[in-house]
Image (cartoon, rainbow, N blue to C red):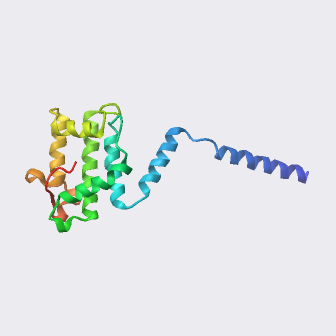
Amino acid sequence: MKRKMIVFFLLTGIVFLANGCKKQSDEESDTELLSSILSQGNAINSACQRFILSEANCVATADSSLSVCSNLSSRLKGEILPQELSTDAVAILYFDCFTRVNLAYNLAKACNQNSFNSNSDYRRVQRTGTSQAELSFREAFNQCASLENAVPPADSGLRETDTVLRSDPF
């Protein structure tokens, strides 16, 4: 009887372990991979990756954040004035503000991953399009960047930095 109980508990344990090890769906795997990528590296790379991913929601062939973020971060920091305040911390605030603007644009445009061919197409339409979504995008983008005498959103943290962008870094 004791032997049967041991075998029963062993089999029960194996069944529970086997259920816990079942294959995840591709979507669950992709989400975990994305979370893992975003949690690695330094903070400015994570902010840049979030920005690129906000564009990727509407792009068929999105830029790889691993290949573009170093250059994109440098370009953004190069546009921050005054230059002595061009730090990673300030650049992160800009990336986060622009990410929120992109997400609002994506909702207004009701876009999906087939809406634009590339990140450059996405940005070109944002900046030159004539729909209400593009007009709203440009107003919000100018606010984040403090372009055309616009004032950054209060919740962005950019007002306190006393910085502006010289021009659109993207």
Is residue 164 visible to the viewer in this orientation of the structure?
Answer: yes
Which picture quadrant has residue 94? bottom left
Q: Nearer the viewer, residue 105 or 1?
A: 105
| Residue in the picture at 17% in, 65% down | 83
Residue 130 placement (x, y as % from top left): 14, 33
Indicate whether 20 appears above or below 155. above
> From the viewer's perspective, is 17 left or right of 44?
right
Q: Residue placed at 89% from the left, 52% from the top?
A: 3
When the figure is inspected, residue 43 is found, relative to residue 147, above or below; the finding is below
- Total label count? 0
The front one of 34 and 69 is 69
The residue that appears at 14% across and 52% down in the rendered structure is 167
Q: Residue furthest left?
A: 149
Picture coordinates of residue 21, whole percent (x, y): 64, 46
Residue 156 seen: no
In the picture as drawn, the residue positioned furthest to the bottom comes out as: 84
Residue 36 location (% of width, % of height): 47, 53
Q: 13 or 162, which is in the foreground? A: 162
Residue 95 picture location, percent across and down:
27, 54
Question: Horizontally, is 137 left or right of 112 in the view?
Answer: left
